[in-house]
Image: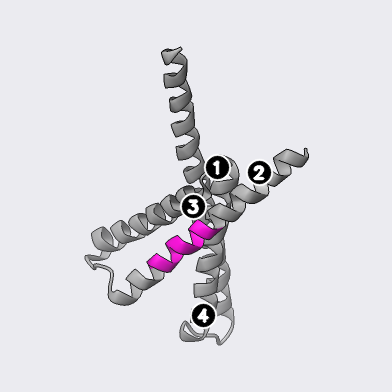
Amino acid sequence: MARRLKGERKIESKSFGTAILYGLIFIFVFAAVCSLLISFIMRFTSAGESSLQYIVTAISFIALFGGGFLSGGKRKEKGWLIGSVTGLIYSLIVFLFQFLGYDRLFDAEQVIYHTCYTLIAMMGGILGVNIATNNSKHA
């Protein structure tokens, strides 16, 4: 019986990692597609980078919420945990890219943004778990 429990824990941790991976893939694919669209807007219109700043910020929040939502929906439990881990791993990847690629640390504004990103992903995870659990109860 102990072996069975050990195997169940492996499956549980595997689905935890898989759910986070789905969320991260969603975040980066969504961000890449939106970045492409915004670059086309900037290229073919007179819109500048400063005029699209709030739109880019809103898209970032939508991407993190969607990634947390997808992670929570895949995991179907502990949405606050899976969403926050998804947000933290996203922030870690961005931090490593910035530090290793540009030799810059986060400034105070970026720390605030990434804290909000993590909180938004956490809210998405909570909502994703609740919607996924409600749908599976009705099916």
Q: Which of pointers 3 and 4 indicates the residue nearer the eye?
A: 3
* Secondary element at image label 2: helix
**Residue indicated by mark 3:** 80
Picture disc at residue 133? 2
Let me know if residue 117 is in the magenta part: yes
Q: Is tag 4's residue or tag 1's residue first in the polypeptide sequence? A: 4
Q: Which three-letter amino acid code belongs to the residue tagged 2?
A: Thr
Q: Gap between marks 2 and 4, in whole Å? A: 34 Å
Q: Is residue 32 visible?
A: no
Dot placed on the residue nearer the N-terminal end, 2 or 3: 3
Question: Magenta includes 39?
Answer: no
Which of label 2 and label 4 is nearer to you?
A: 2
> Measuring 56% from the left and 65% from the top, which residue is drawn there?
62
Mark before the other along the chain sequence, 2 or 4: 4
> Magenta segment, which residues?
114-123
Measured Cα–Cα span from mark 3 to mark 4: 26 Å
Residue 4 in the image, given as x and y percentages of width and height: 47, 16
Depth check: give the residue in front, 89 or 80: 80
Q: Residues within 10 Å of mark 1 (few under 14, many from 20)?
A: some
Residue 18 image offset from top left, x and y in percent: 49, 38
Kindly state the secondary structure of the residue where label 3 is placed: helix
Residue at point 29%, 57% (across, down): 96
- Asked whether disc 2 touches disc 1, contact meaning CB atoms under 8 Å apart, the reply is yes
Q: Amino acid at mark 3?
A: Trp
Residue denoted by label 1: 77
The residue tagged 4 is 54
Residue 47 lies, with reference to residue 93, above or below; the image says below
